Image (cartoon, helix red, strand yellow):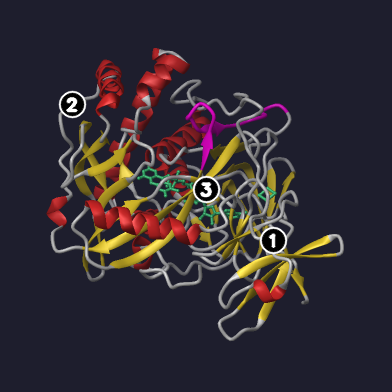
Amino acid sequence: MNLPLPGKPDCCWVASAPRTDYPALSGAQDCDVVIVGAGIVGLTTALSLIAAGRSVIVLEARRVGRQVTGRSSAKITAQHGLIYRHLIDAFDRERAQAYANANRTALTMIRTWISDFDIACEYEPKSAYTYTCDSSRMGDIQREAEAARDLGFDARVLDRAPLPFATAGALEFPDQAQFNPARYLVGLAHAVEARGGRIYEQSRAKSFEPDKGWRIGTDYGTVHARQVVIATNITVKSPVGYANRTQPRSHVVMAFRTENPAAVDGMFISIDDPTHSIRTGRDADGPVILTLGPRFNTGQDGDVAHRFRDLEAWTRAHLPVREAVWRWCNEDYDTADRVPYVGQPDPKEAPGFFVATGFNGWGISNGTAAGLQIASEIASGSRRWGKLYDPNRPAPEDFHQSGDTQSLVDDLARIALGQGGVITRGEEKIAVWRDEGGHLHAVSASCTHKGCTVTWNNADRTWDCPCHGSMFERDGTVIHGPAREPLAPREV
Ligand SMILES: Cc1cc2nc3c(=O)[nH]c(=O)nc-3n(C[C@H](O)[C@H](O)[C@H](O)COP(=O)(O)OP(=O)(O)OC[C@H]3O[C@@H](n4cnc5c(N)ncnc54)[C@H](O)[C@@H]3O)c2cc1C
Ligand code: FES
């Protein structure tokens, strides 16, 4: 359980992107639109609103582009597994067409901005492939191809995926792309700033007060604006709750050195169980092959480390890789119908309050489309893709599945060096980790979002909430999720 995992515990895109150093917000500021979150949604919205003549302020809790977007597999594609047949069946052809159009527009926007703003982000055109190793799934591939062609895609069925292992077949969308998403977002941030947008980092939005518009407060400052856009991946505040309409899901990701990067030419995702995703890329030292393991509910697995070992074993069995050089976890939020929630949830009671969440692991294109749609709704009152992303769609009550901590221990002595566990003291649960020198460090195990008890992630060494996916550093600092406050310090 406590054996070292292969690879550096960081994301190769983030590690090789230039660092940003925007100031923290202080004092009182005004603008037309305040955007909370400098991921792909926030920065796309900011740039689009500036182009429409609005003044914007972006508040980022941590650093630009280093969270979900920066740590994704960053395939820029409108091929989202088997999505189009599902959309036609679950909604109708019109909604499926809107989804195709939104994501195609996003692909074009990303390519255009990379060129216009000269963003060095290793953009490479590639085909996207959805593949199966199970011949009984070829009917699903065929049906998806027909649906996609009907919606205007050049969708090709192949009798094998161009991978160095046997597959039963694949669906190819040519002319998609991949990039380094952290570099892209740093480039977008520069473009926002160069056009007069103000960006503040290390500025977590904590209060959201209606006040002839919205007044957003951080620890050291406030911003007043007519509209606020909550671009925090999962909403940290909303007139309509999304934590129970969405399901947080995590993946483990590894990057391996390879002698033969050409062995993988394209971006691949399987529809088999367990599923894997594959692409190439590069870090500062050369080419890498990247693989992703199957999804799991955040905070509901007490041994994330074994997922890295399984992924390493799978990768070595299937691809020509040498040593693992990077490894990391990343999290996104699913929706029941596989379509994000984007827009103004309550225009009557909370006018000017916009959200974007639930990207189902496909937020590079959907997140870009979300930013474009919010900007056009603010600037011109028009929703570019109609009802597609309707933020008021209900979700089935049993879709969201909270869990419980996986880390309870009855004795501190059971916590190994470098590991964590949750102990019970009276009525309270305390999250304790033991550093490499044997010293114990404790925080409340009660998540500051809605009080669920956190789980120790034994690979990333974070505290992860099994209810709505908040993640905290070992010292309790918020990393990600709906929580806005740290886990409170405790004595042991
Ligand atoms: C493993 C994995 C692989 C993926 N691969 C792909 C892929 O290949 N293609 C694809 O299309 N999609 C992919 N996705 C999905 C995609 O990465 C996400 O949907 C998308 O990046 C989400 O963007 P975002 O702007 O919502 O979130 P983020 O990039 O996380 O941005 C949100 C920002 O808000 C900040 N923030 C949070 N709270 C506050 C606050 N209170 N105040 C101020 N700032 C705050 C955060 O620090 C963060 O910087 C993947 C997801 C995962 C988990
Ligand atoms: S994220 Fe909601 S209770 Fe922890």
Q: Which label number is shown at residue 408?
A: 1
Q: Amino acid at mark 3?
A: Ser
Determine whether the residue tagged by mark 1 lies in a helix, strand or loop: loop
- Residue 306 vs residue 49, the one in the foreground: 306
Marking on residue 156: 2
In the rendered image, the quadrant that contains the C terminus is bottom right
Q: Residues within 10 Å of mark 2 (few under 14, many from 20)?
A: some
The residues tagged by marks 1 and 2 sit, at their Cα atoms, a distance apart of 50 Å
Q: Name the mark nearer the viewer: 3 or 1.
A: 1
The residue tagged 3 is: 55
Question: What distance separates the C-alpha of mark 2 from that of mark 3?
Answer: 44 Å
Residue 418 in percent (x, y) is at 56, 75
Label 1 beta carbon less than 8 Å to ligand 2: no
Decide: few, some or many residues near mark 1? Use Cα within 10 Å; few <14, some 14-19, many ≥20.
many
Q: Which range of residues does the magenta coloring cover?
A: 333-348
Relative horizontal placement of residue 91, taking residue 312 as reference (left or right): right
Task: Return the x and y of residue 330 as percentages of the image width and height.
Answer: 46, 53
Percent position (x, y) of residue 210? Answer: 74, 42
Mark 3 in CB contact with mark 1 (< 8 angstroms): no
Residue name at image x 20 percent, y 37 percent: 167
Quote the CA–CA distance across marks 3 and 1: 49 Å
Which numbered circle lies on residue 182?
Answer: none
Which circle, 2 or 3, is nearer the viewer?
2
Type of amino acid at the residue the image marks with label 1: Leu
Q: Secondary structure at mark 2?
A: strand
Q: Can the viewer see residue 237?
A: yes
